[in-house]
């Protein structure tokens, strides 16, 4: 890897530790090159170690990030009262809107904006219950995340669940972008066991999106028959591109997709409505893990946690209007170039892809649509923090 590529990796992760940066610069000095002009072994191992450590996390911690307190949002008079269980630990009123998200330090700024957008645009914000999944291997970070949520959203109804990220790491194969290989990206496959059994239906949201419509409309998506999840489908996308030639050339594998009740289409797993009871009954987590284990032995896909979902559910999901996932605003997985909205109405904007709006805004190189994300940014500016 060339040193300018290393700096691009570090910049995309918002790595701000000057001492580490200076070390990288030191190792990139020509005096560290061997007689053949190649980088000497110490620098190679340093760069490899550096990238390995920071590929799933950012050096920007909750101690460096200060967030403003969000306004409190109240239910409209037409909202139903939540039917709480007599047990005070019961978090499953059946008429609540349950929302699941992963939560970590590197994407915290995006998560805070997403939460604010959900509360701001729903008629019944007090009826929304958030279920946050954090990496169990980072218990100290989980405590800081909990404190940050409580400080910025004092009235938020939420629970935090530790996810055994070390256990799932053994199943993960490298993909085209290191950020896709983080174990927490795979937590969406384990919601049925992480969340209490009383949670029957969940809306799963990525952290790089904002809603501009009432989430209760999305949560009311019917899941009838055998449909376990609902999401917008994109049948014009080249579905075959999500799998390798090794997959398509193996009849025993490719026929799995041929026996669906309708042709399989691509869907983005960053926005899904999931029937957790049907998921548990169908043991779909086990099925996803079996595809991941096969991937370890035989390279059948390249794109992180998405392909196992496609293998299990493509052609079997309930339809959702495209307005609920205007995805791809972060560009592709390599350069993260600016993109326009898809034609049609918009209820949710999703910066899937390499480019994230907060990073581009901080770098002074925002895309036009990043201005739509900025009003939901709760991060305190340095000036505001000094004034406080």
Image (spheres, rainbow, N blue to C red):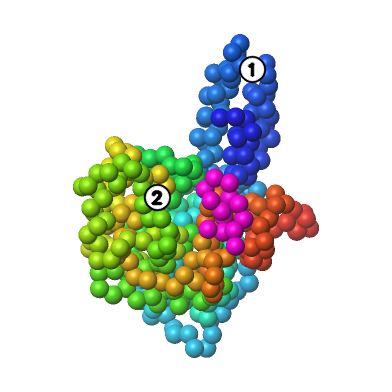
- Closer to the camera, 358 or 113? 358
Q: Position of residue 45 (x, y in %)?
A: 53, 24
Quarter of the image for the N terminus: give it: top right
Percent x, y of residue 239: 38, 55
At horizontal 64% and vertical 63% (from top left) the residue drawn is 369
Rendered residue at 52%/48% (across/down): 333
Measured from the top left, where is residue 273 in percent x and y?
39, 68
> Of the numbered discs in the image, which one, if any, rests on residue 241?
2
Quarter of the figure that contains the C terminus: bottom right
Tell me which numbered mark, 2 or 1, is placed earlier along the sequence. Answer: 1
27 magenta-colored = no
Task: Find the distance from the CA under tag 2 to the CA under tag 1.
Answer: 41 Å
Magenta segment's dominant SS is loop
Query: Which image quadrant is residue 89 in?
Result: bottom left
In the image, residue 299 above or below residue 186: above
User: What range is drawn magenta here?
Assistant: 328-340
Mark 1, residue position: 32
**Magenta span includes 330:** yes
Residue at figure coordinates x 50%, y 71% from the top left: 323
Label 2 SS: helix
- Write the residue at 43% across / 51% down: 185
């Amino acid at each position: 890897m060339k040193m300018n590529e290393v700096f691009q990796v570090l910049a995309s992760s918002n790595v701000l530790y000057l001492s580490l940066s200076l070390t990288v610069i030191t190792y990139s000095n020509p005096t560290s090159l061997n007689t053949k002009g190649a980088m000497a072994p110490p620098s190679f191992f340093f760069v490899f170690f550096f990238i390995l450590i920071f590929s799933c996390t950012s050096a920007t911690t909750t101690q460096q990030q200060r967030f403003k307190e969000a306004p409190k949002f109240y239910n409209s008079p037409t909202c139903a009262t939540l039917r709480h269980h007599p047990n005070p630990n019961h978090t499953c009123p059946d008429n609540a809107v349950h929302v699941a998200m992963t939560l970590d330090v590197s994407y915290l700024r995006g998560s805070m904006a997403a939460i604010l957008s959900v509360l701001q645009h729903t008629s019944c914000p007090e009826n929304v219950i958030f279920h946050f999944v954090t990496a169990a291997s980072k218990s100290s970070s989980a405590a800081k995340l909990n404190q940050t949520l409580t400080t910025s959203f004092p009235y938020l109804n939420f629970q935090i669940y530790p996810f055994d990220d070390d256990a799932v790491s053994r199943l993960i194969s490298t993909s085209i972008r290191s950020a896709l290989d983080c174990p927490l990206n795979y937590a969406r496959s384990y919601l049925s066991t992480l969340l209490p059994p009383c949670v029957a239906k969940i809306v799963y949201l990525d952290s790089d999106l904002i809603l501009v419509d009432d989430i209760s409309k999305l949560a009311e998506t019917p899941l009838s028959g055998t449909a376990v999840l609902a999401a917008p489908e994109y049948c014009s996308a080249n579905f075959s591109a999500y799998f390798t030639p090794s997959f398509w050339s193996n009849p025993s594998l490719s026929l799995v997709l041929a026996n669906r009740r309708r042709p399989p289409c691509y869907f983005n797993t960053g926005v899904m409505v999931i029937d957790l009871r049907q998921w548990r009954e169908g043991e779909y987590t086990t099925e996803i893990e079996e595809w991941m284990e096969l991937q370890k032995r035989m390279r059948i896909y390249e794109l992180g946690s998405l392909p196992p979902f496609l293998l299990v559910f493509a052609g079997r999901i309930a339809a959702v209007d495209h307005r609920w996932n205007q995805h791809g605003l972060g560009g592709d997985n390599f350069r993260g170039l600016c993109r326009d909205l898809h034609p049609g109405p918009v209820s949710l904007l999703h910066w899937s892809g390499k480019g994230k709006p907060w990073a581009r805004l901080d770098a002074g190189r925002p895309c036009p649509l990043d201005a739509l994300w900025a009003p939901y940014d709760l991060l305190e500016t340095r000036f505001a923090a000094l004034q406080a």
